[in-house]
Image (spheres, rainbow, N blue to C red):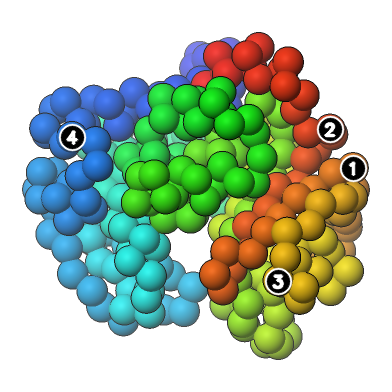
Amino acid sequence: MTSAGISLMTDGEIAEKIVELVAWARQRYAVPEESTGRETCEALGLGLRRAQLPKGVDGLLTEDRLVVVGTDIAWTSRLEYTIFHEAVHHLLDEHSELVEYFTETLRGDDRAFKAAIERCCQAGAGEFMVPRHRVRECIARHGFSVDLIERLAGRHGASIVASAIQVATYAPVDCYVAVCSYGVSPRFWPPNQTLYVDQAAMRPGMRYPWARYAPIPPDHLFHRVWENKRRMDGPSFVPFPHSGQRKPCEHAEAKPLGDRVVGILYDGHPPRKGQLGLNLALP
């Protein structure tokens, strides 16, 4: 219990709350699976438009129930993910249990509060686009690997980002899953052309998130995949640009997908086949 008498939730319990929130919204507003972002906004009573937004800001939700998506977003799948992300902001405000929980447990730490809400919106957007039961089915059928990201995205018409988030959320072992792009990172200096983290997610319960837009060093496995344009695996590390620290990873795997690189950094060993059935019951 906290000093305010609120029971602390685990990351897994918070993830379960997000799944329940999406399920509630689907039933309450008649939003079937495979609905588009626009259809979902219409069902929720949200407006939707495109506008120029500050660099590094994909979308936002205004006080008058309008979802605004940046005109810089070119990929249709990324556009869909951003719409769902902002729709979940609305649902969190409307069904305020988690907002109230974070307000109490993270009182006085505005940065941590915003980060917690953003993680919930990531998870909710992923759940809308690639439902949990589909992810579990895919892991059980095909095993756990970086190939799941492309497989799920292709099957559901979802963004690579949404698929990566769901793969991380329901991974049978601790790991980071990242989608990387090449260009100028919107938030890190100096403004050089580099491979950087477009989006990163980690299995619930892990302690240290990998910052979005963090540059990928030239000696990283993901960077070598970008340069060689082929799938690779082997040891690597998680770079934390703010501290300059590197967290070693015994195993990593990555592959190019169009003009991006998707990859998994395992915090330990990749799952053995026998582990999958034991861990698929996790949130």
Q: Are marks 2 and 1 in contact (CB under 8 Å)?
A: yes
255 or 174, nearer to the observer: 255
Q: Is residue 43 above or below residue 205?
A: below
Instruction: Kindly identify which numbered label has been placed on residue 229.
Output: 3
Q: Are marks 4 and 2 in contact (CB under 8 Å)?
A: no
Instruction: Kindly identify which numbered label has been placed on residue 32.
Output: 4
Q: Quadrant of residue 278?
A: top right
Q: How would you rate the neighbour count of disc 2 (Cα within 10 Å): few for under 14, some for 14-19, many for 20 or more?
A: some
Real-space Cα distance between discs 1 and 3? 22 Å
130 or 108, nearer to the observer: 130
Label 1, on which residue?
A: 250
Question: Residue visible at 50% across and 39% down?
Answer: 166
Identify the amino acid type marked 1: Glu
Upstream in sequence: badge 2 or badge 3: 3
Left or right: 94 in relation to 126: left
Label 2, on which residue?
A: 269
Left or right: 36 in relation to 76: left
